[in-house]
Image (cartoon, grey):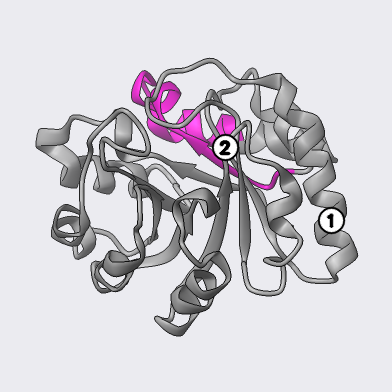
Amino acid sequence: MDQLIVPSVLSSDFSRLGDACVAFERAGADRLQWDVMDGHYVPNLTFGPDVIASCRELVSCEFEAHIMCERPEELLPRYVEAGCQWVLVHPETLRQPHRTYQQIRELGAHAGIALSPATPLAHLDHALDLVDMVLIMTVNPGFGGQDYLASMEPKIRRARTMIEQSGRAIDIEVDGGINADTIGRAAAAGANVFISGSSLAKADDLTKAIDELRRRAAEAVS
Protein backbone atom coordinates (compact mmCIF):
# COMPACT_ATOMS: atom_id res chain seq x y z
CA MET A 1 0.00 0.00 0.00
CA ASP A 2 1.09 3.58 -0.59
CA GLN A 3 2.89 5.40 2.21
CA LEU A 4 0.99 8.65 2.81
CA ILE A 5 2.17 11.69 4.76
CA VAL A 6 -0.72 13.67 6.22
CA PRO A 7 0.10 16.87 8.12
CA SER A 8 -2.18 17.87 10.96
CA VAL A 9 -3.07 21.54 11.00
CA LEU A 10 -3.43 21.40 14.79
CA SER A 11 0.11 22.69 15.34
CA SER A 12 -0.30 25.55 12.86
CA ASP A 13 -0.92 29.20 13.67
CA PHE A 14 -4.71 29.32 14.00
CA SER A 15 -4.76 32.88 12.65
CA ARG A 16 -3.20 31.63 9.40
CA LEU A 17 -4.79 28.23 8.82
CA GLY A 18 -5.38 28.91 5.14
CA ASP A 19 -1.73 29.77 4.60
CA ALA A 20 -0.73 26.61 6.46
CA CYS A 21 -2.92 24.44 4.21
CA VAL A 22 -1.40 25.98 1.08
CA ALA A 23 2.13 25.51 2.42
CA PHE A 24 1.51 21.85 3.29
CA GLU A 25 0.08 21.09 -0.13
CA ARG A 26 2.93 22.81 -1.94
CA ALA A 27 5.39 20.81 0.18
CA GLY A 28 3.91 17.51 -1.03
CA ALA A 29 1.34 16.53 1.61
CA ASP A 30 -0.92 13.69 0.49
CA ARG A 31 -3.89 15.12 2.38
CA LEU A 32 -4.55 17.26 5.48
CA GLN A 33 -6.01 16.31 8.84
CA TRP A 34 -8.32 18.47 10.92
CA ASP A 35 -8.39 17.50 14.60
CA VAL A 36 -11.89 18.40 15.75
CA MET A 37 -12.14 18.61 19.56
CA ASP A 38 -15.09 19.64 21.71
CA GLY A 39 -13.59 20.09 25.16
CA HIS A 40 -15.60 17.12 26.48
CA TYR A 41 -14.31 13.88 25.00
CA VAL A 42 -10.82 15.41 25.07
CA PRO A 43 -9.66 18.36 27.19
CA ASN A 44 -9.14 20.75 24.29
CA LEU A 45 -11.25 22.86 21.93
CA THR A 46 -10.28 23.40 18.30
CA PHE A 47 -12.34 24.02 15.17
CA GLY A 48 -15.62 23.04 13.57
CA PRO A 49 -16.95 22.64 10.05
CA ASP A 50 -17.17 26.35 9.26
CA VAL A 51 -13.44 26.80 9.85
CA ILE A 52 -12.66 23.77 7.71
CA ALA A 53 -14.94 25.02 4.93
CA SER A 54 -13.17 28.40 4.93
CA CYS A 55 -9.94 26.69 3.83
CA ARG A 56 -11.43 24.16 1.40
CA GLU A 57 -11.14 26.22 -1.79
CA LEU A 58 -7.53 27.16 -1.10
CA VAL A 59 -6.13 23.67 -1.81
CA SER A 60 -7.04 20.63 -3.89
CA CYS A 61 -5.71 17.87 -1.62
CA GLU A 62 -8.16 15.78 0.39
CA PHE A 63 -9.23 16.72 3.91
CA GLU A 64 -9.89 14.31 6.75
CA ALA A 65 -11.77 15.18 9.92
CA HIS A 66 -10.64 13.32 13.04
CA ILE A 67 -13.63 13.96 15.28
CA MET A 68 -12.81 13.81 18.97
CA CYS A 69 -16.23 14.86 20.25
CA GLU A 70 -19.07 13.42 22.25
CA ARG A 71 -22.08 12.41 20.16
CA PRO A 72 -20.74 13.59 16.77
CA GLU A 73 -23.50 12.00 14.69
CA GLU A 74 -25.69 15.07 14.17
CA LEU A 75 -22.87 17.17 12.73
CA LEU A 76 -21.43 14.51 10.42
CA PRO A 77 -23.12 15.95 7.30
CA ARG A 78 -21.58 19.34 8.05
CA TYR A 79 -18.05 17.96 7.90
CA VAL A 80 -18.68 16.32 4.55
CA GLU A 81 -20.31 19.51 3.26
CA ALA A 82 -17.23 21.41 4.50
CA GLY A 83 -15.12 19.31 2.13
CA CYS A 84 -13.84 16.38 4.18
CA GLN A 85 -13.48 13.24 2.09
CA TRP A 86 -12.52 11.20 5.16
CA VAL A 87 -14.34 11.22 8.52
CA LEU A 88 -12.85 9.40 11.49
CA VAL A 89 -14.81 8.76 14.68
CA HIS A 90 -14.09 7.15 18.05
CA PRO A 91 -16.50 4.25 18.73
CA GLU A 92 -16.85 5.02 22.44
CA THR A 93 -18.40 8.41 21.54
CA LEU A 94 -21.15 6.84 19.42
CA ARG A 95 -24.60 5.62 20.41
CA GLN A 96 -24.75 3.29 17.40
CA PRO A 97 -21.23 2.80 15.97
CA HIS A 98 -22.22 0.50 13.10
CA ARG A 99 -24.99 2.86 12.00
CA THR A 100 -22.58 5.81 12.15
CA TYR A 101 -20.04 4.14 9.87
CA GLN A 102 -22.90 3.47 7.45
CA GLN A 103 -23.99 7.09 7.71
CA ILE A 104 -20.54 8.40 6.82
CA ARG A 105 -20.41 6.21 3.73
CA GLU A 106 -23.94 7.22 2.72
CA LEU A 107 -22.82 10.85 2.91
CA GLY A 108 -20.20 10.02 0.28
CA ALA A 109 -17.11 10.06 2.51
CA HIS A 110 -14.63 7.39 3.54
CA ALA A 111 -15.30 6.12 7.06
CA GLY A 112 -12.55 5.65 9.61
CA ILE A 113 -12.53 4.16 13.10
CA ALA A 114 -10.17 5.80 15.58
CA LEU A 115 -8.82 3.84 18.53
CA SER A 116 -7.24 5.61 21.49
CA PRO A 117 -4.42 3.81 23.31
CA ALA A 118 -6.74 2.11 25.82
CA THR A 119 -9.49 1.35 23.29
CA PRO A 120 -9.40 -2.36 22.39
CA LEU A 121 -9.16 -3.80 18.89
CA ALA A 122 -12.39 -5.69 19.58
CA HIS A 123 -14.17 -2.64 18.13
CA LEU A 124 -12.92 -3.77 14.72
CA ASP A 125 -14.75 -7.09 14.87
CA HIS A 126 -17.94 -5.67 13.37
CA ALA A 127 -16.49 -2.64 11.59
CA LEU A 128 -14.01 -3.87 8.99
CA ASP A 129 -16.75 -4.41 6.43
CA LEU A 130 -17.65 -0.70 6.62
CA VAL A 131 -14.51 1.30 7.30
CA ASP A 132 -11.76 2.34 4.91
CA MET A 133 -9.20 3.23 7.56
CA VAL A 134 -8.24 2.29 11.10
CA LEU A 135 -6.51 5.01 13.10
CA ILE A 136 -4.29 3.75 15.90
CA MET A 137 -3.53 6.63 18.23
CA THR A 138 0.10 6.60 19.33
CA VAL A 139 -0.60 9.25 21.97
CA ASN A 140 -3.63 9.96 24.11
CA PRO A 141 -5.82 12.28 22.05
CA GLY A 142 -6.28 15.92 22.93
CA PHE A 143 -3.01 17.77 22.40
CA GLY A 144 -0.17 17.93 19.90
CA GLY A 145 3.48 17.62 20.81
CA GLN A 146 3.23 14.42 22.87
CA ASP A 147 5.82 11.63 22.75
CA TYR A 148 5.22 8.59 20.55
CA LEU A 149 3.96 5.53 22.42
CA ALA A 150 6.03 2.60 21.13
CA SER A 151 3.79 0.34 23.22
CA MET A 152 1.15 0.76 20.49
CA GLU A 153 3.25 -1.10 17.90
CA PRO A 154 1.90 -4.57 18.82
CA LYS A 155 -1.60 -3.12 18.48
CA ILE A 156 -0.72 -1.87 14.98
CA ARG A 157 0.58 -5.34 14.06
CA ARG A 158 -2.57 -7.04 15.33
CA ALA A 159 -4.75 -4.57 13.45
CA ARG A 160 -2.81 -5.27 10.24
CA THR A 161 -3.35 -9.00 10.71
CA MET A 162 -7.07 -8.50 11.24
CA ILE A 163 -7.29 -6.37 8.10
CA GLU A 164 -5.42 -8.92 6.00
CA GLN A 165 -7.78 -11.63 7.24
CA SER A 166 -10.77 -9.46 6.26
CA GLY A 167 -9.62 -9.40 2.64
CA ARG A 168 -10.31 -5.66 2.33
CA ALA A 169 -7.83 -2.93 1.42
CA ILE A 170 -8.00 -0.86 4.60
CA ASP A 171 -5.40 1.73 5.55
CA ILE A 172 -3.83 1.89 8.98
CA GLU A 173 -3.14 5.44 10.08
CA VAL A 174 -1.03 6.42 13.08
CA ASP A 175 -1.27 9.73 14.87
CA GLY A 176 0.87 11.00 17.71
CA GLY A 177 4.58 11.71 18.03
CA ILE A 178 5.31 10.82 14.39
CA ASN A 179 8.62 12.26 13.26
CA ALA A 180 11.74 11.16 11.40
CA ASP A 181 12.85 9.05 14.37
CA THR A 182 9.57 7.22 14.96
CA ILE A 183 7.89 6.85 11.57
CA GLY A 184 9.98 3.83 10.59
CA ARG A 185 8.86 1.91 13.67
CA ALA A 186 5.20 2.57 12.95
CA ALA A 187 5.65 1.65 9.28
CA ALA A 188 7.44 -1.59 10.14
CA ALA A 189 4.55 -2.49 12.46
CA GLY A 190 2.06 -2.15 9.61
CA ALA A 191 0.95 1.48 9.35
CA ASN A 192 0.85 3.15 5.94
CA VAL A 193 -0.70 6.57 6.67
CA PHE A 194 1.20 8.89 8.98
CA ILE A 195 -0.08 12.02 10.72
CA SER A 196 2.60 14.52 11.61
CA GLY A 197 1.91 17.80 13.35
CA SER A 198 4.41 19.37 15.71
CA SER A 199 7.48 17.93 13.96
CA LEU A 200 6.44 19.52 10.66
CA ALA A 201 5.52 22.78 12.40
CA LYS A 202 9.14 23.01 13.57
CA ALA A 203 10.64 22.23 10.14
CA ASP A 204 12.70 24.90 8.40
CA ASP A 205 11.97 23.31 5.02
CA LEU A 206 8.56 21.63 4.81
CA THR A 207 9.26 19.93 1.49
CA LYS A 208 12.44 18.31 2.79
CA ALA A 209 10.74 17.32 6.04
CA ILE A 210 7.84 15.60 4.26
CA ASP A 211 10.20 13.93 1.80
CA GLU A 212 12.31 12.64 4.70
CA LEU A 213 9.26 11.19 6.46
CA ARG A 214 8.17 9.46 3.27
CA ARG A 215 11.67 8.10 2.66
CA ARG A 216 12.02 6.68 6.15
CA ALA A 217 8.61 5.05 6.03
CA ALA A 218 9.41 3.44 2.67
CA GLU A 219 12.79 2.20 3.88
CA ALA A 220 11.19 0.55 6.90
CA VAL A 221 8.98 -1.66 4.74
CA SER A 222 11.36 -2.26 1.82
Q: State whether residue 83 appears in this view.
A: no
- Which part of the image, by quadrant, shows the N terminus? bottom right
Residue 156 higher or lower than 172, as above or below? above
Taking 206 as reference, is 116 left or right? Answer: right
Amino acid type at image mark 2: Ser
Residue denoted by label 2: 116
Compared to residue 90, the image places residue 46 above or below, namely above
Instruction: Name the one closer to the observer, 174 or 129.
Output: 129
Question: What percent of the width, then of the height, locates residue 29?
Answer: 44, 47
**Between 84 and 111, which is closer to the camera in this rendering?**
111
Instruction: Name the element at disc 2.
Output: loop
At horizontal 45% and vertical 84% (from top left) the residue drawn is: 106
Can you name the residue that lies furthest to the bottom here? 106
Q: Which of 64 and 44 is in front in this view?
A: 44
Is 196 contained in the magenta span? yes
| Labels 2 and 1: the sequence-earlier one | 2
Magenta region: 191-213
Q: What element carries label 1?
A: helix
Q: In this view, does 79 lie to the left or right of 157?
A: left
Label 2 – label 1 distance at C-alpha: 17 Å
On the image, the x and y values in percent for residue 49 come to: 21, 59
- Is 87 above or below relative to 14? below
User: Could you tell whether 44 is left or right of 182 in the image?
Assistant: left
Q: In this view, does 76 lie above or below 214?
A: below
- Quadrant, the C terminus: top right
Tally of numbered tags: 2
Dot 1 amino acid type: Met
- Percent x, y for residue 107? 40, 81
The disc at residue 109 is none
- The residue drawn where x is 43% and y is 35% is 207
Left or right of 21 on screen, residue 214: right
Q: Quadrant location of residue 91?
A: bottom right
